[in-house]
Image (cartoon, helix red, strand yellow):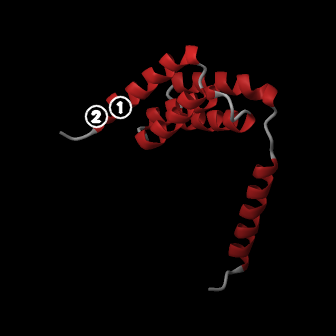
Amino acid sequence: MTLRPQGRLSVLLLTICLVLSSAITVRPADFISLIRQSREQSQNDQFVEALASAQDAVRANAKDYKGYYYVAVAYLGMGSFNEAETAAASSLQLAPASFKPGVERLVDAIKTRRQLASPP
């Protein structure tokens, strides 16, 4: 398969974009603002944007349960139950004991929404 010049340019531009996006880092100080942004976006049913913000928060601080929590919330809003469960499980694993009940409520909400979405 031979690419035409336009195809080669598209592949080159895509490669450059991928390299640049992987080089962009999020400072840990931005973590809290990303969490707030994801929460607000989820509250406004902007789940794709909320997911992107939450994923950026996870990249900024992968050891904090809140990033995974809001990844799960965004996936739940999009109806992606498997991904929501995976993120919620990560959040539950990282959450301090005093915050585990809140994460467990999210896990229950995911299970309930999955059941409601399943055909009888």
Q: Secondary structure at mark 2?
A: helix
Q: Residue furthest bottom?
A: 1
**Residue at horizontal 33 percent and vertical 35 percent from the top:** 114
The disc label shown at residue 115, or none: 2
Left or right, residue 24 beside residue 46? right
Residue in front for this viewpoint, 73 or 65: 65
Between 102 and 40, the residue placed more toward the observer is 102
In this rendering, would 68 be left or right of 85? right
Identity, as a three-letter code, of the amino acid under mark 1 = Lys
Residue at x 45%, y 33% (from the top left corner): 76
Circle 1 sits on which residue?
111
Q: Is residue 78 left or right of residue 19?
A: left
Q: Residue at 56% x, 35% y: name it.
A: 90
CA distance for labels 1 and 2? 6 Å
**CB within 8 Å, label 1 to label 2:** yes
Question: Of 64 and 117, which appears nearest the observer?
Answer: 64
Q: Badge 2 local density, few (<14 within 10 Å), some, or many (20+)?
A: few
